[in-house]
Amino acid sequence: MIRREIEIFAPPEVIWEWIRRVDLWSDWNSEISSSWFIDDEAVGARFKWRRKLLGVRCKITSSRSGREWSWTGSYRMIGVTQSFRLDGNFRSTRLSTVVAFKGLPARLLAPLLRWYGSRWCEIWLGTLKTRLESQHERNRSGKGGPGGGRVSPAAQAQADRERHRIGV
């Protein structure tokens, strides 16, 4: 089992949108060459992602709005699960991920999969941090970027509630 976490200067709701939109993973994660939903985006929904020739069939196993999201999948008798947990407020979020491999081939290839899984987690988290924080800076400077500096009504309401709670 591989665990990694990172602090990202973005509210959980923003990060949540980047994680749960499987169909957009290949737009921002250089390790994924294509990704798409087979079903809708609910728990139990199937999706597939590819990394070059490696194709992984997956299923969403949990989704707690804005806080947790996980999937399980398989490739050539190796089972894999990845979960994300988001803890934060309107300013920043601690994003953690856990990857685990299962099955006889996974036990036989344990050192290689540990190395690969660790690298995978670090790329996921590092790429999200870089993309979201650079997007935030572009929006603050008025230079636009995805979303053109607009904040969703839900994210704005959450930020307002959090500001009120802490007395800002």
Image: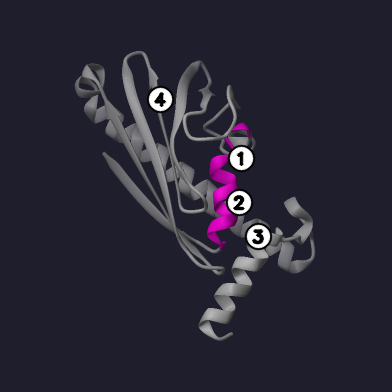
* Residue corresponding to mark 3: 154
Label 2 sits on residue: 131
Give the structural element (helix, strand or loop) at label 4. strand
Q: Quadrant of the N terminus?
A: top left
Separation of marks 3 and 2 at Cα, in angstroms: 21 Å
- At a point 59% along the width and 39% down the height, the residue shown is 21
The reply to whether discs 1 and 2 touch (Cβ–Cβ < 8 Å) is: yes
**With respect to residue 165, does 23 lie above or below?**
above
Q: Please identify, in this view, whether the residue under mark 1 or under mark 4 is nearer the observer.
A: 4
Return the residue found at the far bottom: 167
Between residue 76 and residue 164, name the one nearer to us: 164
Name the spot of residue 120 as percent of width and height, x first. 41, 37
Say whether disc 1 or disc 4 marks the residue closer to the N-terminus: 1
The residue carrying pointer 1 sits among few (fewer than 14), some (14 to 19) or many (20 or more) residues within 10 Å by Cα, namely some
The secondary structure that most of the magenta stretch takes on is helix
Q: Does the magenta segment cover residue 67?
A: no
Q: Indicate the amino acid at tag 1.
A: Trp
- Specify start and end residues of the magenta stretch as a single range: 10-23
Quickly name the residue at label 1.
Answer: 28
